[in-house]
């Protein structure tokens, strides 16, 4: 989703980790050694994201949510692009660039830049509220995602490689619970065979009434 808006990916060709060393910028050990360096790097990431705009696929999902109830978005992206497009009920598996937290439990939501690098409550450094290398995912977030998937009738996978767990197991969970599965991805994935329909298109094109007529798929499951 976000790559089509111009947000650099983290892995793969021209990904962030081809230019930067995550061991110095994206793990708890790096933050403990040099929090200012890590925070400044993430500030650069937010500035880069702000230069990008949601594409028409993001906007179509937002319109769809206004027309129908019960549509949830589960994302591995941390850039907040869905929210900028007006999407609601977004479950962020890996956290958000726009949130920071402290060990004391205090959290702050950012508009653009950090209001303060240190927590006013206890004085320690805020850390970005995202999943770094070596971190475990928040079990409550995973449970929320699984709850949404357990009761879904239509499961749409957009652009994911289906190799990063636990998200790679979500379509299997949806299939087990009787959902109709639709995959949107220009390239096949390891799980393409379990989907009822595969659209070999980019998200900005596939997420439209032309290629994804929602009534067609709801008529399949209703």
Image (cartoon, rainbow, N blue to C red):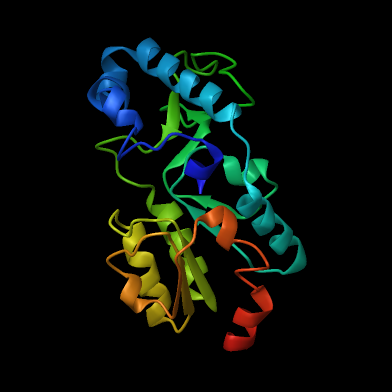
Q: Nearer the viewer, residue 117 or 210?
A: 210
Residue at screen point 31% across, 39% down:
11
Residue 100 is left or right of residue 134, and the answer is right
Left or right of 80 in this view: 44: left
Is 25 on the left or on the right of 174, as rendered?
left
Indicate left or right for 87 with 8 as reference: right
- Pick the front one: 36 or 188: 188
Q: Residue 22 lies in what quarter of the image?
A: top left
Residue nearest the observer in this picture, 12 or 126: 12
Residue 154 position (above or below residue 12): below
Q: Please identify the quarter of the rendering in which residue 67 is found.
A: bottom right
46 shown above or below 66: above
Given the current orientation, which residue lies at the most extreme right position? 67
Residue at position x 41%, y 56% in the image = 142
Would residue 198 be seen by someone viewing this image from the given angle?
yes
Residue at horizontal 34%, vertical 71%? 192
Q: Residue 193 placed where, x, y %?
A: 32, 76
Q: Residue at x 30, y 44 (%)?
A: 136
Name the quadrant of the C terminus: bottom right
Q: Position of residue 214 (x, y in %)?
A: 65, 74
Q: Residue 27, can we see it? A: no
Percent x, y for residue 168? Answer: 33, 61
Where residue 174 sits in the image (x, y, percent)? Answer: 42, 75
Please tell me in which quadrant of the rendered image residue 49 appears: top right
Count the marks: 0
199 and 176: which is toward the camera: 199
Vertical placement of 36 versus 138: above or below?
Answer: above
């Amino acid at each position: 989703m976000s790559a089509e808006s111009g947000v650099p990916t983290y892995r793969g060709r021209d990904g962030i980790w081809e230019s930067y060393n995550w061991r110095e910028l994206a793990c708890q050990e790096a933050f403990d050694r040099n929090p200012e360096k890590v925070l400044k790097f993430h500030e650069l990431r937010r500035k880069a994201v702000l230069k990008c705009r949601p594409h028409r696929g993001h906007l179509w999902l937002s319109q769809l949510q206004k027309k129908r109830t019960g549509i949830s978005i589960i994302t591995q992206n941390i850039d907040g692009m869905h929210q900028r497009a007006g999407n609601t009920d977004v479950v962020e598996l890996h956290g958000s660039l726009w949130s920071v937290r402290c060990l004391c439990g205090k959290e702050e939501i950012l508009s653009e830049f950090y209001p303060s690098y240190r927590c006013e409550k206890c004085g320690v450094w805020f850390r970005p509220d995202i999943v770094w290398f070596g971190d475990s995912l928040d079990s409550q977030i995973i449970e929320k995602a699984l709850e949404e998937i357990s009761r879904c009738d239509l499961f749409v996978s957009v652009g994911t490689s289906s190799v990063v767990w636990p998200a790679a197991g979500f379509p299997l969970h949806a299939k087990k619970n009787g959902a109709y599965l639709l995959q949107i991805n220009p390239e096949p994935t390891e799980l393409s065979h379990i989907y009822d329909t595969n659209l070999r298109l980019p998200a900005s094109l596939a997420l439209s009434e032309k290629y994804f007529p929602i009534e067609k798929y709801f008529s399949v499951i209703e």
